[in-house]
Every structure is written in structure tokens, then in C-alpha cells.
Amino acid sequence: MLSTVEAAKRIGVSKSALLRWLAEGLVEDVERDWRGWRVWRSHDVERVKAFQKAYHSKPIRRIRRNAMSRAEYAKAAAQSMRSFAMGYSPRPGAGM
């Protein structure tokens, strides 16, 4: 039985990375003891090592959702600022 720190060392990642994977649901959570602490067994460590290998095997392609040119982006930003400025009115009596 291993603690989370010991399991992370055996896997080769930081404790925070391991806990983030658990929190994001990328790795199935492990058994807990009577105090609520995680108890890592050798098969849990091997399962996470397999995940880590698959997770880092290829680079993740970054995709922009709405690819815009710089000009389109500038135009959209200017329009957004204009609509914000038109809709902005200070509260009555504020700053007076």
C-alpha cells in the first residue's frame, strides 16, 4: 500500500498532476482507508502508468474553434467595445 506521494514517484509524475488526473476523471479513483486517504496498490500504479504512456504518446493538436484573421479579430473587438460603450451609463448619483 502506497500513499499518493509514493505512487506519484513510482509513476514518474508530481503529486499535483496525479491528483489533477483524478479530479478531471482521466484516471479512476482508488480505494480509501478509514481516514479518507487514498491507498494505492501496485495494480493501481500500473494502471496509471499505462494511462500516462497513452496520454503522452502523441502531441495533442491545438485547434482554434473560430479561426479568424487578425483583421476580423480587430473588427470584432472594436464592435464589442462600441456596443459596451453605448450600453454603459453610470449609476445616477455615482461619483458626484
Image (cartoon, rainbow, N blue to C red):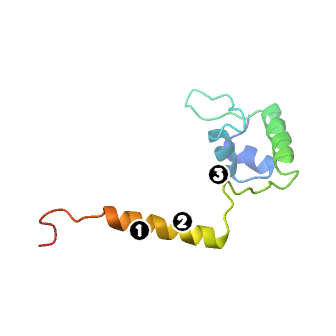
For discs 3 and 2, the disc positioned in front in the rendered view: 2
CA separation, marks 2 and 1?
10 Å
Amino acid on which disc 1 is placed: Arg
Q: Which mark is residue 7?
A: none
Q: Mark 2 or mark 3, which is nearer the start of the sequence?
A: 3
Q: Position of residue 10 (x, y in %)?
A: 80, 47
Label 3 residue SS: helix
Location of mark 3 (residue): 16
Query: In percent of the image, x 64 and y 51: which residue is there?
Result: 16
Q: Position of residue 18 (x, y in %)?
A: 69, 46
Q: Mark 1 or mark 3, which is nearer the start of the sequence?
A: 3
- Give the side of residue 44 with respect to residue 82, left or right: right
Query: In percent of the image, x 66 and y 64: which residue is there?
Result: 68
Label 1 residue SS: helix
Q: Which mark is residue 76?
A: 2
For discs 3 and 1, the disc positioned in front in the rendered view: 1
Amino acid on which disc 3 is placed: Ser
Q: Residues within 10 Å of mark 1 (few under 14, many from 20)?
A: few
**Quadrant including the N terminus:** top right
Query: In percent of the image, x 68 and y 51: which residue is there?
Result: 17
Q: Mark 1 or mark 2, which is nearer the start of the sequence?
A: 2
Count of numbered tags: 3
Please tell me in which quadrant of the rendered image residue 30 appears.
Answer: top right
Location of mark 1 (residue): 82
Q: Residues within 10 Å of mark 2 (few under 14, many from 20)?
A: few
Amino acid on which disc 2 is placed: Ala
Q: Position of residue 71 (x, y in %)?
A: 62, 73
On screen, residue 24 above or below 66: above
CA separation, marks 3 and 1?
43 Å
